[in-house]
Image (cartoon, helix red, strand yellow):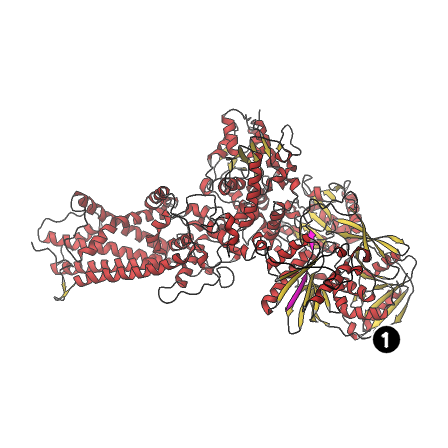
């Protein structure tokens, strides 16, 4: 089996959460093999990330080039193809960057590509058995892939929890091997989402509030919980009708279709129309004082409680963590 | 602008529980209905809108069997000018790379300035567009949610985390994978499909598009699906009981495990 | 004998210009101009699509007698209605006199044939009262319109200038006609009195009588001048008015008679895509629906011309009430203004831009806002139609692919699965599980029965509404009805699919359902869903008789097959019945559901102000559940407040969609615990005592 590399995503001198997850995945895919972090970028920020990664990975390969100041997948691909040895295994986060880079990289490296891995069932004689999801997460599947000649693998975020791995790797400057980094796609700028305009369709965790909140003033406790959880606030139709929250936050057939990982249904009865806007098989927590509310039929975890009392207590506990 | 849009016929699973067949090697497809992959539909709409503005034509292509023709017709009813069905026994069981290889053959048979794919399809791999671009040595961008046509190049927006948009300039010819929400696809009714029911759709096999049959199909696939399974989820909610404190502790454990706490 | 005053036919102005010249010229110019204007106005009707409105002449004449002549719908708005009736009958009476006067200007002794004898005496007696009544009616109308300005007439800014000036001006023109006619007569009688001749009798208290008394002391010269002057003021005003009518909302004076004659005779149906093109030939049509103005039918254009901007439709429209971007009267007014500006009186016809979208007169939201509840058409005193136009405009949008995203999914699910939720066909009969002591036969299994229970999509798949299905089944079991369901062979009835303009999809659903129903061999159909009832009864052909469950309940109770036990009087429940649009207005079933409720011994039921044919739509069913236009309030929320005002704490509906909307609205209005909603079937099933 070839060497194992993890591509480290970073911004403003701080590595992405995926940096600590990829090494956990790497250990499952290639137990015992040293894992090298590849970090591209330029200047002091790059050095900072390399230093941080050296504490976690067995080695850090640094590629410093002005063309890599922003992680343009087309440019990064060229650098990786030139730097990473043939037959290597490259791990990427399966996010907007990894999706941009992974498939093309596998072609250029002439190795197989395994997308969006959510679990590893082991490696048997160079053949990896991985777990993936299909049909918007409604069913899971095992895939097998011979990775003895190398592979590019995209790892879903959040499934391999950082385990506090530590290694004392050295930073190796590979900038000289990056080669020609000209590309036909030029990064211009990042246009920030409009302030206050939350796009709940992209949220991974939603605290969703319904009629059980009773009064507009009570919404405050919901926002506090969402803040503590790092979640966004969404709602059901009656809340929008009452003009307590903007329409863009409404989940349902007449509102937004959301695909979170975790959905906290607070005081939502779970009407057909509301549930129609919930896709991707999220983990649903339902809190409602009415045990007959249909939401309990579809929820994974249910709690019989008045949300006005329950939410502040939950928020407090989470803040203490 | 000559635009090729790659589309896929997928089972419509949004409202139905998926059941795994007795062999465990596929989902139960008897009761399923099929439609064009949602992302691909946005890609076709985008192509039509570009052509409406700057001229040219839109061709839709799919790899599949006779039944896949229906999605080509649906997209032609939307406004695509031509359809191509890539069908060959040798194509069966192709993995993502195999599909990209077949599509590459189709691209090289034509003269396209722009190739669009959906960002992902039913298998959720989001891989064919990027592979196709790399094979063709065309520039590529994924998750595109904005396209402005320019002279020999495009200004594109990519959807990135946090609802932000990454703006890029990309040279033609190129491959873009399209994210939902880039436009509002038009409605296609039964009437529209009937109007194009008699339009001839050429069927091309491996030999027609110069694809080496041994490079595609099941035998050439490096990534193989072994089985399907449904992760355990019990019936109805697990009701948490006990004192409020106990309930909250249990809930927090769950939230941690499911990625609900950041 | 020398006449007391020289008539306009013999008078010489300044002693040498014979005024008879004017008497001849004014009518010639007036009629000529009127003919020219009318020819131009008819042009858009000629260019419009065909419409089939010449059938069933007896019913049409009856409509004219009832709605046009007897002004049957006017008193629904008492003040405006009574004023209008006075003016309308005044006009009818005075039209004879006015025509007579026109000829009198040429031949002074002319008397309208038939008015020479006693009939004439009676006529002349009443026409003075008519003129007086009209005079006062228009003065009150002008004050009401110009000073008090009822809300109904307010023009939102987006719809352009209002019609108050036009309305008040026309009131003054009519007043002028009344005054000049009376003066002309009064001068003559005053002169007769002065000369001691046998004076013509003038009805006391009339304008003419009043003027005569004022003029008794006037000099003969003055009387002569006034006599001539008032004649020509009347003559000019009369022909001016005639030519002014086709310029605006008073066109209805001319067109309403025809509009009522040609108005729709059937309710509950939607007109075909194109008259004269069968369902099988629809594929051959180049285009569907109304995209440009000439795609409207000639009756649509006649509707536009006929709208008097009285605002009754919009006042009743639930969409307008909750401030959705739809006000039915402006569908007409904007259509009329479009016709006027694109088919001008002078110059070439103007090229037609699309009606919807940028530069068009209608907006997409406006057209999707309509729930097709039919309140507007029920109210219009002159038979203007809206549902057909709305549906045809939607057909045009659907044909162009212009369908809101939120509607595309349910439509495509209907195409693939036969229900808007995309649920599997085999789950259509799942509601029967959990039904005790009642067997529901399944025709898909080869069972047979006399009666088909047509469940329809929402009742089959929505968990809450499945309870309505079970209640319906229990009632039929208790009443000893041998019935079954189609199960997976049943598709959505398509009532809303048709009304959302997806005609070809409706045709598919209709064909599949029709085949399944006929194959089952049932002798009659029962449904608890008024939308299904409407579709099966009015849109499908060759079906066995269809009954709504309320009719079955009433019949079974009266025949003693269904026994109901008394209500628990301690619970303090007061019921009110909400008329579903597709049961009430569209199908005239108002009494049976009430009788079914009242069949429960001891039940207390009150009526809401807006009930029966003025029932207020819950915000609609079917695909309406998937589309939500901008609105300030929910229709359902308004409706539950109306029920509260009526003193009720339980709303009984007879439609699953009403129930969905009412239950939602109770939550939105924060009235949980104070108000509840229940389906008629559920209420009756809970009181079965067999």
Residue range corresponding to the magenta coloring:
B1-15
Q: Nearer the viewer, residue C506 or C366?
A: C506
> Of all residues shown, which one is farthest toward the left?
C1
State whether residue C121 is above or below residue C22. Answer: above
Q: Position of residue A23 (x, y in %)?
A: 86, 59
Q: On the rendered image, what quadrant is the N terminus of chain A found in?
A: bottom right
> Quadrant of the rendered structure where residue C517 is?
top right
Q: Position of residue C289 (x, y in %)?
A: 49, 54
Residue C307 in sight in this render: no
Q: Which residue is mark 1?
A: A176
Q: Is residue A25 left or right of residue B113?
A: right
Left or right relative to C522: residue C591: left
In which quadrant of the rendered view does residue B84 lie?
A: bottom right
C514 to A245, vertically: above or below: above
| Vertical position of residue C437 compared to residue B234: above or below | above
Q: Is residue B218 visible?
A: yes
Residue C621 at x, y percent in the picture: 55, 45
Is residue B10 in the magenta section? yes
């Amino acid at each position: 089996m070839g060497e194992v590399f993890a591509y480290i995503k970073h911004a403003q001198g701080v590595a992405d959460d995926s940096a600590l997850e990829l090494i956990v995945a790497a250990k499952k895919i290639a137990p015992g093999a040293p894992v090298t972090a590849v970090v591209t970028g330029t200047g002091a920020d790059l050095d900072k990330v390399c230093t941080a990664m050296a504490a976690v990975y067995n080695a850090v390969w640094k590629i410093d080039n002005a063309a890599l100041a922003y992680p343009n997948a087309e440019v990064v691909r060229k650098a990786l193809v030139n730097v990473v040895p043939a037959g290597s295994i490259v791990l990427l986060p399966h996010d907007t960057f990894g999706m941009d880079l992974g498939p093309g990289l596998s072609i250029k490296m002439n190795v197989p590509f395994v997308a969006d891995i959510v679990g590893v069932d082991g490696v048997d004689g160079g053949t990896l058995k991985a777990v993936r999801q299909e049909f918007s997460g409604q069913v899971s599947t095992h895939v097998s892939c011979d990775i003895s000649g190398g592979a590019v693998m995209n790892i879903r975020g959040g499934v391999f929890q950082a385990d506090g791995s530590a290694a004392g790797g050295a930073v190796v400057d590979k900038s000289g091997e990056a080669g020609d980094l000209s590309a036909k796609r030029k990064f211009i700028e990042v246009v920030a989402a409009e302030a206050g305009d939350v796009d709940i369709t992209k949220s991974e965790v939603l605290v969703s509030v319904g009629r059980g909140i009773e009064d507009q003033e009570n919404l405050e406790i919901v926002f506090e919980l969402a803040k503590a959880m790092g979640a966004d606030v969404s709602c059901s139709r009656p809340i929008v009708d009452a003009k307590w929250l903007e329409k863009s936050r409404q989940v349902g057939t007449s509102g937004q279709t959301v695909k979170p990982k975790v959905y906290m249904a607070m005081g939502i009865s779970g009407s057909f129309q509301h549930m129609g806007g919930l896709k991707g098989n999220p983990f649903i927590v339902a809190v409602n004082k009415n045990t007959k509310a249909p939401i309990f039929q579809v929820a994974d975890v249910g709690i019989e409680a008045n949300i006005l009392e329950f939410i502040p207590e939950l928020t407090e506990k989470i803040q203490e963590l | 602008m000559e635009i090729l849009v790659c589309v896929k016929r997928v089972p419509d699973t949004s409202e139905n529980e998926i059941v795994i067949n007795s062999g465990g090697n596929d989902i139960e497809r008897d009761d399923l209905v099929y439609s064009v992959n949602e992302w691909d539909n946005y890609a076709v709409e985008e192509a039509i809108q570009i052509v409406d503005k700057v001229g040219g034509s839109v061709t839709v292509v799919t790899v599949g069997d006779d039944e896949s023709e229906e999605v080509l017709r649906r997209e032609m009813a939307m406004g695509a000018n031509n359809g191509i069905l890539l069908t060959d026994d040798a194509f069966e069981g192709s993995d993502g790379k195999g599909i990209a290889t077949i599509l590459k053959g189709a691209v090289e048979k034509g003269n396209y300035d722009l190739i669009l794919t959906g960002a992902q399809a039913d298998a959720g791999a989001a891989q064919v567009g990027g592979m196709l671009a790399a094979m063709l040595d065309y520039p590529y961008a994924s998750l595109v949610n904005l396209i402005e046509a320019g002279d020999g190049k495009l200004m594109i927006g990519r959807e990135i985390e946090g609802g932000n948009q990454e703006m890029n300039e990309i040279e033609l010819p190129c491959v873009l994978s399209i994210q939902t929400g880039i436009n509002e696809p038009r409605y296609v009714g039964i009437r529209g499909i009937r109007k194009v029911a008699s339009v001839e759709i050429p069927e091309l096999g491996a030999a027609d598009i110069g694809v080496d049959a041994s490079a595609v199909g099941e035998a050439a696939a490096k990534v193989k699906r072994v089985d399907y399974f449904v992760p355990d989820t019990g019936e109805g909610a697990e009701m948490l009981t006990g004192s409020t404190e106990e309930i909250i502790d249990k809930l927090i454990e769950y939230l941690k495990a499911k990625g609900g706490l950041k | 004998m020398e006449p007391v005053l020289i008539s306009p036919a013999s008078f010489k102005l300044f002693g040498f210009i014979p005024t008879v010249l004017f008497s001849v010229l004014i009518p010639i110019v007036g009629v000529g101009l009127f003919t020219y204007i009318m020819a131009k106005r008819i042009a858009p009707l000629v260019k419009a699509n065909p419409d089939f409105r010449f059938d069933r002449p007896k019913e049409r004449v009856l409509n004219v007698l009832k709605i046009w002549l007897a002004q049957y719908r006017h008193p629904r708005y008492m003040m405006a209605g009574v004023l209008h009736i006075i003016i309308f009958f005044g006009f009818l009476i005075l039209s004879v006199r006015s025509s007579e006067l026109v000829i009198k200007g040429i031949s002074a002794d002319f008397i309208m044939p038939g008015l020479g004898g006693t009939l004439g005496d009676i006529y002349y007696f009443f026409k003075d009262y008519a003129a007086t009544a009209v005079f006062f009616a228009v003065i009150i109308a002008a004050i009401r319109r110009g000073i008090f300005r009822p809300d109904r007439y307010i023009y939102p800014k987006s719809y352009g200038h209002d019609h108050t000036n036009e309305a008040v001006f026309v009131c003054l023109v009519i007043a002028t006609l009344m005054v000049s006619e009376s003066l002309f007569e009064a001068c003559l009688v005053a002169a007769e009195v002065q000369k001691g001749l046998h004076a013509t009798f003038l009805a006391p208290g009339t304008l003419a009588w009043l003027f005569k008394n004022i003029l008794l002391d006037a000099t003969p010269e003055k009387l002569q001048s006034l006599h001539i002057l008032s004649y020509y003021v009347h003559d000019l005003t009369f022909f001016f008015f005639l030519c002014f009518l086709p310029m605006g909302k008073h066109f209805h004076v001319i067109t309403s008679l025809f509009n009522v004659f040609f108005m729709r005779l059937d309710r509950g149906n939607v007109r075909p895509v194109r008259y004269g093109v069968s369902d099988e030939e629809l594929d051959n049509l180049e285009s569907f629906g109304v995209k440009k103005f000439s795609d409207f039918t000639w009756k649509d254009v006649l509707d536009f011309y006929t709208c008097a901007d009285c605002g009754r439709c919009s006042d009743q429209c639930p969409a307008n009430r909750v401030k959705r971007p739809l006000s039915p009267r402006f569908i007409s007014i904007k259509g009329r203004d479009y016709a006027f500006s694109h088919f001008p009186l002078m110059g070439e016809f103007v090229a037609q831009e699309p009606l919807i979208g940028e530069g068009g007169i209608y907006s997409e939201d406006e057209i999707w806002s309509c729930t097709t509840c039919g309140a507007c058409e029920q109210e219009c005193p002159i038979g203007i139609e809206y549902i057909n136009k709305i549906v045809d405009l939607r057909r045009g949008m659907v044909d162009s692919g212009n369908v809101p995203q939120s509607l595309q999914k349910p439509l495509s699910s209907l195409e693939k699965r036969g229900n808007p939720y995309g649920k599997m066909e085999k789950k259509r009969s799942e509601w029967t599980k959990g039904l005790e002591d009642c067997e529901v036969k399944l025709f898909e299994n080869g069972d047979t029965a006399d009666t088909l229970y047509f469940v329809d999509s929402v009742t089959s798949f929505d968990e809450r509404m499945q309870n309505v299905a079970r209640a319906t089944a229990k009632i039929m079991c208790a009443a000893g009805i041998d019935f079954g369901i189609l199960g997976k062979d049943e598709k959505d009835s398509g009532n809303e699919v048709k009304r959302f303009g997806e005609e070809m999809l409706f045709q598919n659903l209709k064909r599949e359902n029709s085949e399944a129903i006929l194959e089952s061999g049932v002798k009659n159909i029962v449904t608890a869903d008024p939308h299904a009832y409407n579709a099966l009864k009015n849109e499908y052909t060759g079906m066995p008789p269809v009954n709504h469950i309320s009719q079955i309940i009433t019949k079974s109770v009266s025949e003693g097959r269904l026994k109901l036990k008394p209500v628990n009087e301690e619970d303090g429940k007061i019921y009110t019945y909400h008329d579903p649009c597709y049961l009430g207005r569209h199908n005239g079933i108002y009494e049976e559901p009430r009788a079914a409720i009242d069949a429960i011994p001891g039940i207390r039921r009150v009526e809401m102000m807006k009930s029966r044919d003025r029932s207020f739509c819950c915000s609609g069913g079917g695909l309406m559940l998937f589309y939500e236009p901008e609105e300030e309030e929910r229709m359902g929320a308004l409706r539950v407040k109306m029920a509260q005002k009526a003193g009720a704490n339980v709303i009984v509906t007879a439609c699953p969609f009403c129930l969905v909307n009412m239950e939602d609205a109770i939550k939105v209005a924060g009235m949980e615990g104070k108000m509840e909603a229940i389906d008629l079937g559920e209420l009756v099933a809970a009181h079965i005592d067999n």
